[in-house]
Amino acid sequence: MFDLQFPFRLKKRRSLEISNHMPKMSEQYLEEISQQFQIYGEILHAETCKIGHINETYAATYDQAGAQVRYIHQKVNQNVFKDAVAVMDNLVRVTSHLRKKLIERGEKEFTRKALTVVPTRDGKSFFQNGNGDCWRSFYFIEGAKTFESAQTPQQAFEAGKAFGKFQSLLADLPGKRLHETIPEFHNTRKRFLTLQKAIEEDRCNRAKSAAKEIQFALEHEEIVDVLLNALAKGKVPERITHNDTKFNNVMLDQETGKEMCVVDLDTVMPGLVLYDFGDMVRTTTSPTLEDELDLSRVEMRMPMFESLVKGYLETTRDFLLPAEKSYLVFAGKLITFTIGIRFLTDFLTGDTYFRIHRPGHNLDRCRTQFSLVGSIERQEKAMQKLVNKL
Ligand code: GN1
Ligand code: MG
């Protein structure tokens, strides 16, 4: 499965230095797991990566014969990803295929353009410790960066291009259908039903404080089945998609600003390209962060949208069907709405899914999403006109 060997031994280690408020438990884990992978040298220090709401991620620096080399160690959240074996099976297939395709295309920097899984000493794709925790490691991609929000149309263009290319490279993945690592992940009807149940039960007695958002959500019921129906009627096909195409999941080259590598591959599975495009609209077109408190700043900006679509079409033109293209704008609205109701549901049920950093955080995130839905709605016709011309 892997083409890497482990010809080295770990040197005797000095004490591990960890920064960025790493939880104590994780310090112990990290010491332990650093020795499980086919990584040469002594681990010097590590930092928590504050990226994502789900997994725990650390960047660790190793001394390899005098050179400092970084690796990513990541603990998979098994509360969210119940079947770690399936996640890792997909991950290995997807990253191997990406690498093969990049090499075939003559890409010199293929190790920077796709994630590379570092195997464990016994050749597995992940390490499971006594507690059942699942850890995996990747090469760290140097000279590239992620950003929490897109600042320029060029960045939006690069994001569209990167995720479009990702879908295109995976279109001919051989073998069986990928595992659904989270079943019905983008089933908006199911998400809506879960919200309705949370409202009815109101277990944490929070519905009152989210009355406006609940009303907004319920008033939008008519949009939840649109893409599900299009799929059921065969108008749009299932493809291999990323399913978490947040702007901060694409690494941009630090020098050129060009797209380098798509990360966060746990939800790569069968899906609609529209869900991917929708999440790009959600996370690249507004200047704000996902949890912006000043809602007057939340805005779908047309120049960002235009660049995003152009970037996306540049890499998907060969396979994208007219029907898929016709739903791009709608998908932006739908996905923003869907993530909004997921945040709202988590707020109502006690913040058990998305990691929060302050009380009411999930409600704040929901408000930001719904403001963006409003901004998209106000510009939907103009957005559609723009896409139709491309
Ligand atoms: C989660 O962990 P992160 O931030 O990459 C979530 C996405 C949401 C996103 C909202 C597996 O992704 O679906 O869109 O938060 N991932 C999962 O920021 O639920
Ligand atoms: Mg993710």
Image (spheres, grey):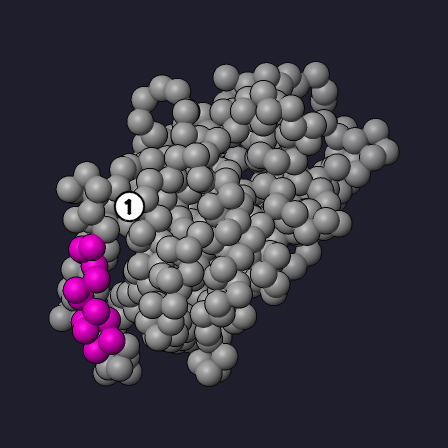
Residue 327 seen by the camera: yes
Front position in the image: 135 or 169: 169
Q: Amino acid at mark 1?
A: Ala
Left-right relation of 224 to 7: left
Q: Give yes or no for residue 81 being in the magenta stretch.
A: no
Residue 52 seen by the camera: no
Residue 213 lies, in percent from the top left, at 28, 77
**Location of residue 228 with respect to 268 vertically, above or below:** below
Left-right relation of 364 to 75: left
Q: Please give the name of the residue rendered at 39% of the width and 35% of the height, measured from the top-left corner.
A: 319
Front position in the image: 339 or 165: 165
> Which residues are drawn in magenta?
215-226
What is the secondary structure assignment of the residue under circle 1? helix
Q: Quadrant of residue 279?
A: bottom left
Residue 76 lies, in percent from the top left, at 45, 43
Q: Quadrant of residue 361?
A: bottom left
Q: Please give the name of the residue rendered at 21% of the width and 78% of the height, measured from the top-left corner.
A: 215
**Location of residue 283 with respect to 116 vertically, above or below:** below
Front position in the image: 196 or 20: 196
For ligand 1, tell me if the residue under mark 1 lies within 8 Å: no
Front position in the image: 229 or 290: 229
Residue 336 lies, in percent from the top left, at 36, 63
Q: Quadrant of residue 383?
A: bottom left
Q: Give yes or no for residue 218 being in the magenta stretch.
A: yes
Q: Please give the name of the residue rendered at 41% of the width and 30% of the height, measured from the top-left corner.
A: 171
Residue at mark 1:
323
**Location of residue 248 with respect to 16 vertically, above or below:** below
